[in-house]
Image (spheres, helix red, strand yellow):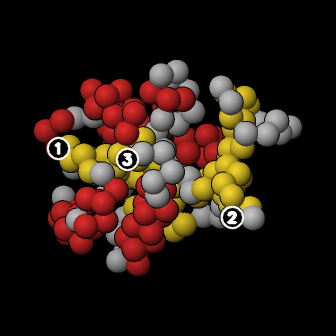
Amino acid sequence: MNIILSDDIDSGKSSAILVFASEAILRGMDISGWATPARMENESKVGHDFVPISNGKLGEKIPFTTEKDTPAYRKWRRFFFNPKPFELAASIESRCKIFLMDEIGPLELEDRMGFYEPFRMALCRADSTITVTRKSCLGLILPLIESERLTVLTLPEFIMKKGELFERLAGS
């Protein structure tokens, strides 16, 4: 089964997916992947962190993106990316029950950079995937994912159907 969680930018997708991953871990589910929650300072979003998920455990947050020029970060459009999360994502084993990918966006879908290779590998190897993307990227991502086993959900639908998703993922 492949699930796409797609909604507007800054709608809370990453926060919801991190809660989902934590609940999956508590349920003993075989989950790996990554989440990229917002990094907040003084109640303002200043970028994103990268949280690796491997062998049913959440890893330590690593600073991932910023709009400020930062030494050793790579610039892409208006953002600066820490390259370490891309390397870590590529090393996370995707042969698992559930592989979670937050976020697959323009960097991957338009330029085939960033998390693109781990994303493609997970689609082939994992029993089930959960891919987070913004609504504006849905048209780019749909052709890449097997449609027979695909469910596309908005954030409210994902939250409302969370229990059902756990049941389906446990049985898939």
For badge 3, the amino acid type reads Asp
Cβ atoms under marks 2 and 3 closer than 8 Å? no
Task: Indicate the quadrant where residue 160 lies.
Answer: bottom left
Q: Which residue is at 55% across, 45% downward?
A: 89
Looking at the image, residue 5 sits to the left or right of residue 64; the answer is left
Q: Which of these two is toward me, 168 or 164?
A: 164
Please name the residue that numbered disc 3 is placed on.
Answer: 7
Please name the residue that numbered disc 1 is placed on.
Answer: 149
Residue 26 visible in rendering = yes
Query: Gap between marks 1 and 2, in whole Å?
Result: 39 Å
Q: Which of the two labelled residues, at mark 1 and mark 2, occupies the earlier sequence position?
A: 2
Q: Position of residue 115 (x, y in %)?
A: 52, 36
Q: Which of these two is toward me, 79 or 121?
A: 79
Please name the residue that numbered disc 2 is placed on.
Answer: 43
Q: Which residue is at 66% across, 54% downward?
A: 45
Task: Indicate the quadrant where residue 38 lies.
Answer: bottom right
Q: Position of residue 77 (x, y in %)?
A: 65, 26
Q: Which element is circle 1 on?
A: helix
